[in-house]
Amino acid sequence: MSGMDEESAYKTQQLNRTGAKCATNQIVFTDDKDHRDDPGSDQKSEQQSGRRSESSTAEAQPSPADRCLPPMQLRRHHSLSDWLMLMSLVLMWGTSFLFTKIAVGGLHSELVAAGRLIVAAVLLVPFAWWLAVRPAAGARLWVFYLLIAIFGNVLPFSLIAWGQRFIDSGLAGILMAVMPLATLGLAHFLVPGERMTRYRAAGFLLGFSGVIVLMGPDAFADLTNSQGHLLPMLAVLGGAISYAVSSILARLRPTSDALFSAASTISLASLLMVPILLFTGDIRPTATPEMPHLIAVLLLGVFATAIATIVYFRLVKSAGPSFVAQLNYFIPLWAVGVGILFLGEAPEPNHLYALGLILCGLLVTQLERRSAVARYSNKSRKALEKRL
């Protein structure tokens, strides 16, 4: 063996030793899961840290230098079941705009919102009663449940349903794509440690530009003439912002079981819809409802609200929030596609341009994480090489 080969072998041996030391003593490898909704995770963390480190090391098989990187560097390959759950959420939530468009053809928007919530509550409450872990009663937790019920269910369901009385389902799906960008803006002011970085600011501006292109130059002129679709589009946009507020509230709420939280918030939202219906007087349908209208509400409650909620929380726990964030790219595309296929909708060119800008804005916000991964990786490798 030559001198260079001996030196190379020595460095490799040292890297292996250093990496093993980091793996056993310092780093707990992660697959980017979100264990926030597991009430027993804090008590089990110390006992299972060694097993998590050992099993994740065997599964991810990082290089020796990678073993000294921060946990965010090591990400496992996602299973087929993760992808199937992701695609099922795209199918259920992307098609919800189609079902809503059908439902508001014979029912008032408040009736559609109340109907899907009641159906979902009937399915989720028994499921949560048997399987969910009930948290200790606390006024602060129930205040969060109430706020999430308002901003995550009552407001967006009502606003989106009303807006879709006047605009296409595909257009509503495109408008909803701004929700994660709105979440970034709100998190800067409401969530400690969440700052508006240059990547996030650039993505937010791209998304905002997409909204302006989507509304078109004549939107405000049509508003003065009581014509056009500006108010319906603003209503759907308000639903997207409501979802963003709900996302922030979900992050700030006290730790509790995910299934129990979903059943509680949807049940509260169902109860809140009762006085809203009585106050507005919109109990009677706008026209004689036909079977397609009623079936659409039933499908919204069963799939887009109840089953989708269960699949969502299971996917977040299985694959992590970063993987689930890909929904924001697929749902608008699916909503536009099913609107064209089943309702004969014809998106205008500015709708497609706006969709491209919004999706580019989402992509730019993801570049921050990848840049951080590359930066930490290069620094850690250089530090190891200097020590050797």
Image: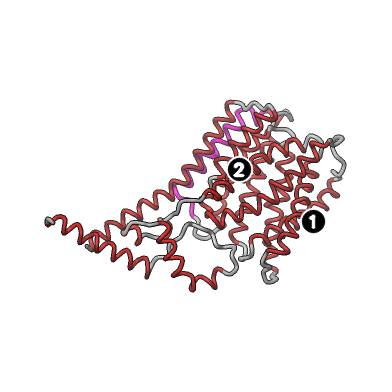
**In front of the other: 194 or 99:** 99
339 relative to 8, above or below = above
The quadrant of the rendering that contains the C terminus is bottom left
Amino acid type of the residue tagged 1 in the rendering: Leu
Which of the two discs, 2 and 1, sits closer to the camera? 2
Regarding residue 95, the answer to whether it shows in the image is yes
Mark 1, secondary structure of its residue:
helix
Specify whether residue 325 is painted magenta. Answer: no
Q: Range of the magenta residues?
A: 195-221
Residue assigned mark 1: 271
Q: Is residue 157 left or right of residue 187?
A: right
Query: x, y percentage for residue 98?
Result: 69, 36
Q: Position of residue 278 (x, y in %)?
A: 86, 49
Q: Crowdedness of circle 1 by 10 Å Cα count: few (<14), some, many (20+)?
A: some
Query: Is 215 a magenta residue?
Result: yes
Q: Quadrant of the N terminus?
A: bottom left
Query: Total of numbered circles in the picture?
Result: 2
Indicate which disc residue 90 carries. Answer: 2
Q: Residue furthest front?
A: 1
Say which residue appears at 31% left-offset and 59% top-offset: 64
Quadrant for residue 380, please give it: bottom left
Mark 2–mark 1 CB contact (< 8 Å): no
Please determine whether, in this image, residue 240 is positioned above or below residue 341: below
**Element marked by disc 2:** helix
Which residue is at a point 74% across and 30% down the rendered structure image? 226
Where residue 313 appears, x then y in whole percent?
A: 61, 55
Quadrant of the image occupied by residue 336: top right
Q: How far, Cα to Cα, is label 2 from label 1? A: 28 Å
* Sooner in the amino-acid sequence: mark 2 or mark 1: 2
- What amino acid does circle 2 point to? Val
Query: In the drawing, does residue 28 fall left or right of residue 358?
Result: left
The answer to whether residue 188 is seen in the rendering is: no
